[in-house]
Image (spheres, rainbow, N blue to C red):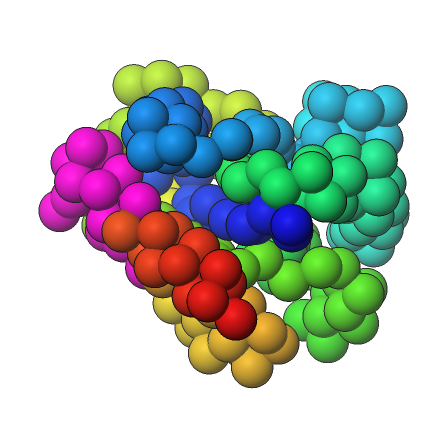
Amino acid sequence: MSGLFITVDGPGGTGKSTLLPLLGTALETAGHHVHLTREPSDGPLGRAARERTSDFHGLSLACLVAADRFHHLAEEIQPALARGRLVLCDRYVPSSYVLQVLDGVPLEYVRRLNAPARRPDLAVLLTAAPHLLDARLRERGTHSRFEHDGSSGPEVRLYDELASVLAEDGFPTFKLDSGEFSPQAAVQAITCHASALLSRNQAE
């Protein structure tokens, strides 16, 4: 029986790293076999994409991230789904739509590059007010050149603008404001969506 594929994307500082372990624990408690992963992946291509954003830019980084994604799908995500696991992925194609466009890559190129990628059953998009995200980034520190003082506003706007494009491209999106929802409330909301999807899949 095929499992369920859930991705979580959003600007830096929205709380993805906090949410994913809590969500995984809640879904495990509900009786699901959860497989947690992330993109860029922990494989060699993913480590290069994650650790060397200062070396790779524009098209080269977009292609590196996509290459890691297809390897990640083939070697980890799709096998876990085939075993009936519920796969939770920290960042996926929606992050590429936003970050690669912010890096100067045309949106249509990013769309075509990622067109063969498996679509998730649920694509969670986290957001929050830019001033709140900037404050969180200053407090925890930045993780790449994409995160800097003032980066949150353009990233939030682009996620908002591209939500309809993601839906058009087959991503069933569910948006949550981490400035309004506590991590526990967000976990509860996503768990309800996941349970509904699993029930529907089992009935089909």
At horizontal 22% and vertical 42% (from top left) the residue drawn is 188
x and y, in percent, of residue 179 in the image: 18, 43
Q: What residue range appears in magenta?
A: 175-191
Q: Is residue 3 above or below residue 193?
A: above
The part of the image, by quadrant, that contains residue 83 is top right
Query: Which image quadrant for residue 18?
Result: top left
Residue 170 in view of the camera = yes
Q: Nearer the viewer, residue 172 or 78?
A: 78
How many numbered discs?
A: 0
Indicate the position of residue 123 as horizontal and vertical percent values.
48, 57
Specify whether 89 is left or right of 122: right
- Residue 28 in the image: x percent, y percent? 40, 27
The residue closer to the viewer here, 41 or 131, is 41
Can residue 178 be seen? no
* Outermost front residue: 203
In this image, 70 relative to 138: left or right? right
- Say if the magenta span includes residue 176: yes
Query: As drawn, which residue projects farthest toward the top?
Result: 140
Please state the horizontal and vertical placement of residue 159, each as a whole percent of the image: 44, 62
Going 29% across and 19% down the picture, which residue do you hit?
139
Q: Any magenta on residue 122?
A: no
Name the residue at 59% across, 74% down.
170
Instruction: Please state if 152 lies on the left or on the right of 145 as rendered.
Output: left
Q: Nearer the viewer, residue 26 or 170?
A: 26
Q: Residue at x 31, y 45 (%)?
A: 191
